[in-house]
């Protein structure tokens, strides 16, 4: 008999019928004798509906009042789910973030959890009740309602699991778990039974939107086993765990991630002097534009080129800023492209295997795919290529690194 | 410069445009230098929408969870109104019932206020902020969200005014104030500048639905001056005050109230013995049917008749119960009618004036209106008549007691 924190997202509770289905599922878990704490999001569409009302009234809504407003979304869900459980004969009790209480700092709309009081929850669990907690929200020291930002319900789930020392934090969503790559691109993509936190973090930061990155970080930090499963389909999903030292034969690469959301900018012919990177990148980050990959070419005759990628939505804005910088630095030219994609191979096995990067580069060269940029971390190699080669590149790498379903050894 | 508690009902905040209008109005009050505490209801329709979701999921929704659910209605309004005020440059801060905190007992869906903590509010007022409080809701000693029942926002307003020792509690609604009678029935009905709490209570209990009766009782008990005005039209409305001993020439009758919601039931030929009234009425009240007027005829040959009125919706139910009682008591017959109406004259002046009732009866007799039942209190005389005479009776009494506009002495 275990203690499980189960998190259901907005789509999983998106209608009264779905709330009833979820209640049925939870009731079955309870009947197996498990203790269950449920974290729910607002019904899908509700948070947007509330935000739209706010921006109609105030162009830049007051953050404190925004939190008061959107926190009602989850409050509706916890009450309805609790009713649905009771209707099925399963004792339950709901709590808002303030009631639990999930203590956060006071940074409205993106607060961070400081502490969770588990006394109330443990009393309810002992009394045989399912405890339902509003995700995404908390309360600061002076009693103001706070929210954790979009996707914060995952974080609430993990934080509760850590505070309660739960056996697992189970994230129920609209995918079956984590795949070796996107099944829409590679038909033979395989569902992973396990993946490490580090690999998951690299995948999440590369745009595989299964889990919120903050929640994965949090789970890794507090060693909370995290499981991603489908809300309405059968299956155990994917368990995200700390690295298992006992398994000798780890697959070298666990997954292929990719991202079409980036754009590339190059400033050509700037003096290769100390501080030049900062001169170029500071104005970009001052404009709140996030820079991902950065590449500086070798110097020729005291001059260098400088390339970086930004989110595709920020391309025009970044280009305008770069034009001003180019004038100040007497740069030769600036170039940019939105037709790029980033493809990454991820795997903790990389640590103990040499030559992984060159296998990747060779495989891409064999398909005549030109690599425009390269970036590496301890467990990841990313390349930027022309967007038109994306699917080909992913399929090629998926096959080269033996991730295809037929070759599964798990 | 005064301290005013202003309560705006669901219709007054029923759309984003209306919330902006209310914010404009409040900003003007602030600019005059007044301290303002605002109590708001849920946007009209919202509470019903939430209740409908609940009853879809659970036929008899759990009361604790129902309160968690419907409390979101006012929480949305306080946030939006606070944003609207800020957008107009008026500093504001919103509070839920839990945050303020409005401490209630634990009777979910119809809790009663025990205490209000005014520290937070007073700090905000001192800092020049408008304070916005969610009406209708509170929190019990263990932190559960409670609600005060339908119309409870009026009660929140009065309770806050009492706790803050406000100069006035102003209830903004969709009428201009309290009239001598319903202007739709008597064209010359006059808006009253003032009315006493006792008169207002009699009017409220007789079905003039301007104010919730609990709020009026509460205001009377704590001597909170209560003003009813229109949310969007000009005018001072009606001030409800304690009786003013200094005004020598009070009008004898202040208003004519009426009610079409009742039905009459008579049980004929029951033994006139001690305890007979209880034998007849206990089963009715056990069925949660409220009895209004009760009339027992004089005894003839040890037998008596017994007549009472109930809400028209309860007529069939009460009749069925009465039929069983009739069999047990060997009563001769039972009779009933839904075609009745109750008309009442109300006025504190009655205390010091004799003959008011007979003036009323004579006036009705002059119009050939038969009186079926009579009931009196210290400041009220009610009669039951055939429903078809209702308008004639109201117009006649309005004129006889000099309430017509042209004869106003105020």
Image (spheres, coloured by chain):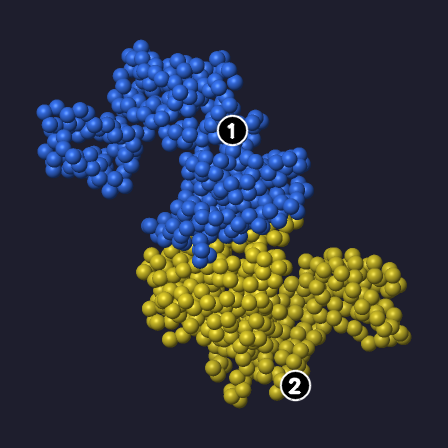
Chain colours: A yellow, B blue
The numbered mark at residue B239 is: 1
Frontmost residue, B399 versus A284: B399
Q: Determine the secondary structure under disc 1.
A: strand
**Eyeballing the image, is B404 above or below A101?**
above
Q: Quadrant of residue A204?
A: bottom right
Query: What chain is tagged by disc 2?
Result: A
Q: Quadrant of the N terminus of chain A?
A: bottom left
**Residue A317 spot, x, y in % from top left:** 74, 57
User: In the rendered structure, the residue with mark 1 lies on which chain?
Assistant: B
User: Horizontal placement of A308 versus B354: left or right?
Assistant: right
Viewer can see residue B79: no
Q: Is residue B64 left or right of residue A100?
A: left
Q: Position of residue B316 (x, y in %)?
A: 23, 34
Task: Say which mark, if any, is on residue A355.
Answer: 2
- Residue at the image point whose x is 50% and y is 66% from the top: A117
SS state under label 2: loop
Give the image location of residue A326, x and y in percent. Answer: 84, 62
Q: Nearer the viewer, residue A314 or B132?
A: B132
Q: Of the numbered discs in the image, which one, if any, rests on residue B113?
A: none
- Frontmost residue, B248 versus A258: B248
Residue depicted at x 38% and y 18%: B353
The percent coordinates of residue A341 (x first, y second) are 66, 67
Splitting the image into 4 quarters, where does residue A243 fall?
bottom right
Q: Is residue A173 left or right of residue B366?
A: right
State yes or no: discs 2 and 1 in contact (Cβ < 8 Å): no
Identify which residue is drawn at 53% across, 54% down: A71
Count neighbours of disc 2 (C-alpha within 10 A) and say few if under 14, some if 14 to 19, many if 20 or more: few
State whether residue B158 appears in this view: yes
């Amino acid at each position: 008999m275990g203690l499980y924190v189960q998190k259901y997202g907005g789509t999983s509770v998106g209608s009264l019928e779905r709330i009833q289905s979820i209640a049925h599922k939870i009731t079955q878990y309870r009947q197996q004798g498990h203790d269950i704490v449920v974290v729910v999001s607002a019904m899908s569409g509700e948070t947007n509906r509330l935000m739209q009302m706010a921006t109609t009234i105030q162009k830049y809504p007051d953050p404190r009042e925004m939190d008061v407003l959107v926190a009602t979304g989850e409050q509706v869900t916890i009450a309805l789910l609790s009713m649905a459980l009771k209707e099925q004969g399963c004792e339950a009790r709901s709590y808002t973030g303030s009631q639990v209480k999930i203590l956060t700092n006071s940074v409205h709309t993106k607060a961070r959890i400081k502490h969770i009081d588990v006394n109330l929850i443990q009393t309810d669990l002992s009394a045989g009740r399912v405890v339902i907690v509003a995700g995404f929200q908390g309360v600061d020291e002076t009693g103001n309602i706070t929210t954790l930002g979009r996707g914060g319900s995952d974080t609430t789930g993990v934080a509760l699991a850590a505070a309660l020392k739960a056996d697992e934090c189970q994230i129920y969503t609209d995918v079956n778990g984590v795949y070796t790559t996107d099944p829409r691109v590679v038909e033979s993509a395989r569902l992973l039974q396990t993946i490490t936190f580090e690999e998951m973090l690299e995948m999440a930061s590369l745009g595989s939107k299964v889990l919120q990155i903050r929640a994965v970080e949090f789970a890794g930090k507090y060693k909370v086993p995290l499981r991603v499963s489908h809300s309405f389909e059968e299956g155990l999903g994917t368990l995200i765990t700390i690295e298992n030292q006992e398994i000798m034969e780890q697959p070298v690469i666990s997954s292929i991630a990719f991202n079409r959301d980036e754009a590339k900018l190059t400033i050509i012919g700037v003096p290769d002097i100390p501080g030049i990177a900062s001169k170029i990148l500071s104005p970009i980050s001052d404009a709140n534009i996030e820079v991902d990959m950065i590449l500086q070419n070798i110097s020729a005759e005291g001059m260098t080129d400088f390339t970086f990628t930004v989110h595709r939505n920020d391309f025009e804005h970044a280009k305008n800023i770069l034009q001003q910088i180019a004038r100040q630095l007497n740069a030769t030219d600036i170039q940019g492209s939105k037709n790029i994609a980033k493809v990454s191979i991820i795997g903790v096995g990389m640590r103990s295997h040499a030559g992984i990067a060159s296998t990747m580069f060779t495989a891409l060269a064999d398909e005549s795919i030109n690599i425009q940029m390269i970036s590496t971390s301890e467990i990841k190699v990313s390349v930027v290529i022309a967007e038109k080669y994306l699917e080909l590149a992913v399929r090629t790498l998926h096959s080269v690194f033996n991730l295809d379903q037929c070759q599964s050894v798990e």
